[in-house]
Image (cartoon, grey):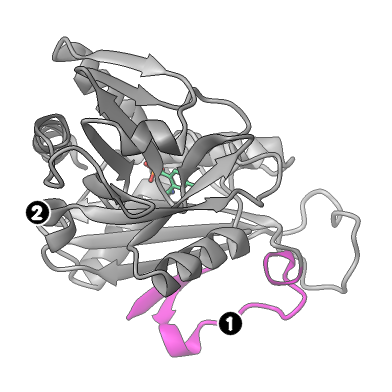
Amino acid sequence: RIVYVNGDFVPEEEARISVFDRGFLMSDGIYEVTSVLGGKLVDFPGHAARLERSLNEIAMPMPMEAEALLDLHRDLVARNGIEDGLVYLQVTRGNPQDRDFAFPPEGTPQSVVLFTQSKPGLADGAAARDGISVISVPDIRWGRRDIKTVQLLAPSMAKMAAKAAGADDAWMVEDGAVTEGSSNNAYIVKDGRIVTRQLGSEILAGITRAAVLRFAREAQMTVEERAFTIEEAQEADEAFITSATSFVTPVVQVDGATVGSGQPGPVARRLREIYLEESRKAAL
Ligand code: PMP
């Protein structure tokens, strides 16, 4: 694989970052994941806008203009011959000096890394066809989940708990309500109404979420942005998740209880279809 590191495109084994980089020592960084379908980037403007917001919330500037970032993404996709897959963008506060809690002086170069993952058939996997199972876990993350930091230990542990329980993913629960999935936004459908948690510092504002809710409203579906419980999910007609890596993926089991018919439901299937069709059309 060819990766991008601070201005250079290099084979992955030649990429180098300081051991004092704050991304490594303090999880002091932001990331974005953009999917690639047919060699083109899905929802890139949304990801660039969220990157800028996340950086701003932790007092970091954009490392370059969004247009230059788009060029880097496209360049890396081409260099790695990615048809379907993902591009990861990692921006940390850098700092090649020494360990210190205080931020380094303004103007200290940030670290900017991009890498790709090839995922042939990303849009037509078994998860979309059959649906996935989730378990609930306590949400032990910090209080600013609206910022997409590289601090991913809690969701990694949630994923491991799911795996140990024989499930595909975890839904995190706080104060009795679902916040979101380990790396995706969570939804239920009851009596034709799509329910997903309202935005706030408790969850990440998914780029896929924004697009899917827009398409749902355009298709005259009813959307309710509010918190819901695991019990509600177990009694729902359907459940699903959204993210750049899963698009819209049905959830057919929650904490061992079958959701609806146990098969992917019509709302999730339709939203996935619309999302993929529109995304392919608008991809850059
Ligand atoms: N919530 C969390 C915690 C995530 O990690 C992700 C994936 N980045 C999402 C939601 C979904 O966001 P997006 O649709 O932008 O991929």
Residue 265 found in image quarter: top left
Pinpoint residue 134: horizontal percent, then vertical percent.
Answer: 36, 54
Image mark count: 2
Q: Is the residue 131 above or below the residue 146 in the image?
A: below
Residue 281 found in image quarter: top left
User: Going 28% across and 31% down the picture, which residue do you hit?
Assistant: 236
**In front: 177, or 27?**
177
**In front: 184, or 123?**
184
Pinpoint residue 13: horizontal percent, then vertical percent.
Answer: 45, 90
The question of residue 283 being in magenta is answered with no
The question of residue 7 being in magenta is answered with yes
For marks 1 and 2, the one nearer the N-term is: 1
In the rendered structure, the answer to whether residue 69 lies left or right of residue 112 reads: left
Please state the extent of the stretch shown in magenta in the rendering.
1-25
Q: Secondary structure at mark 2?
A: helix
In the rendered structure, the answer to whether residue 180 lies left or right of residue 141 reads: left
Tell me the tag on residue 16: 1
Q: Is the residue 246 above or below the residue 11 in the image?
A: above
User: Going 71% across and 63% down the picture, which residue do you hit?
Assistant: 94
Q: Is the residue 224 above or below the residue 14 in the image?
A: above
Question: In the current view of this chain or complex, which residue is farthest to the bottom?
Answer: 13
Pinpoint residue 97: horizontal percent, then vertical percent.
Answer: 84, 73
User: Dots 1 and 2: beta carbons under 8 Å?
Assistant: no
Pinpoint residue 215: horizontal percent, then vertical percent.
Answer: 20, 21
The kind of residue on which mark 1 rests is Arg
**In front: 163, or 144?**
163
User: Going 77% across and 66% down the picture, which residue do you hit?
Assistant: 95
Which residue is under mark 2? Answer: 129
Task: Tell me if mark 1 has few (under 14), some (14-19) or many (20+) residues whose alpha carbon lies within 10 angstroms of its own.
Answer: few
Ligand 1 is found in the corner quadrant, namely top left
The kind of residue on which mark 2 rests is Arg
